[in-house]
Image (cartoon, grey):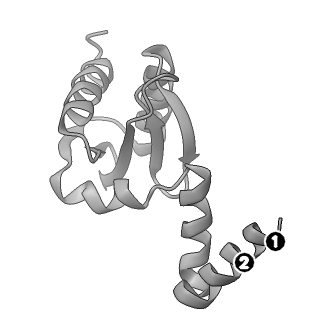
Amino acid sequence: MKTKILILASLILVTGCASLKEGIKGLAGVSTKALEENRKTAIVKVFDMDYFNCYIRALDSLKKMGAYIYAQDIKKYMIAIYVSESDTTPVGVFFKEVIRNATQVEVSSPSSYAKEVIAAKLFSALEGKN
């Protein structure tokens, strides 16, 4: 127990309060920081639907494909998943309302393979092909 307290105190001193929350999330395995950092290489597509419906359809599609959703926030325009319960490769799905009935979807991941697989399945589902 003393070791955990020392680690936590060290984190506070070294990283400061702003990074502490992300550090704790990282230790718990639920951080989305790497997903946000990889957005610059995300696979991107725009869909002809409003943000709310796009988000709900994406969430439903991810569940149907067996992805493990570990973080979601409709107000922050994101869903974070692991490819499956057994494959804990993280993938982020980010949304941006381009105009009223057009939503941009970005799929990011540190893994090119996971990003490509999830993007292909998700984009197909959002296009109504699945």
Q: Is residue 70 left or right of residue 80?
A: right
- The residue nearer to you, when weighing 27 against 114, is 27
Tell which residue pokes out farthest to the right in this image.
1
- The quadrant holding residue 116 is top left
Residue 30, x across and y down, in percent: 55, 50
| Residue 6 marker | 2
For label 2, the crowd category at 10 Å Cα-Cα, with few meaning under 14, some 14 to 19 and many 20 or more, is few
- The quadrant holding residue 115 is top left
Secondary-structure class at tag 1: helix
Q: Is residue 101 left or right of residue 16?
A: left
- The residue nearer to you, when weighing 39 against 44, is 39
Q: Marks 2 and 1, Cα distance to the nearest angstrom?
A: 6 Å
Secondary-structure class at tag 2: helix
Residue displayed at 36% across by 53% down: 35
Q: Is residue 130 left or right of residue 45?
A: right
What amino acid is labelled 1 in the image? Lys
Residue 101, x across and y down, in percent: 32, 43
Residue displayed at 70% across by 82% down: 9
Residue displayed at 54% across by 34% down: 69
Residue 19, x across and y down, in percent: 53, 78
Q: Quadrant of the N terminus?
A: bottom right
What amino acid is labelled 2 in the image? Leu
Q: Does residue 57 lie above or below 52 as drawn?
A: above
Q: Does residue 16 lie above or below 70 as drawn?
A: below
Mark 1, residue position: 2
Residue 46, x across and y down, in percent: 21, 41
Q: Does residue 2 lie above or below 125 as drawn?
A: below
In contact (CB < 8 Å): disc 2 and disc 1: yes
| Residue 77 marker | none
For label 1, the crowd category at 10 Å Cα-Cα, with few meaning under 14, some 14 to 19 and many 20 or more, is few
Q: Quadrant of the C terminus?
A: top left
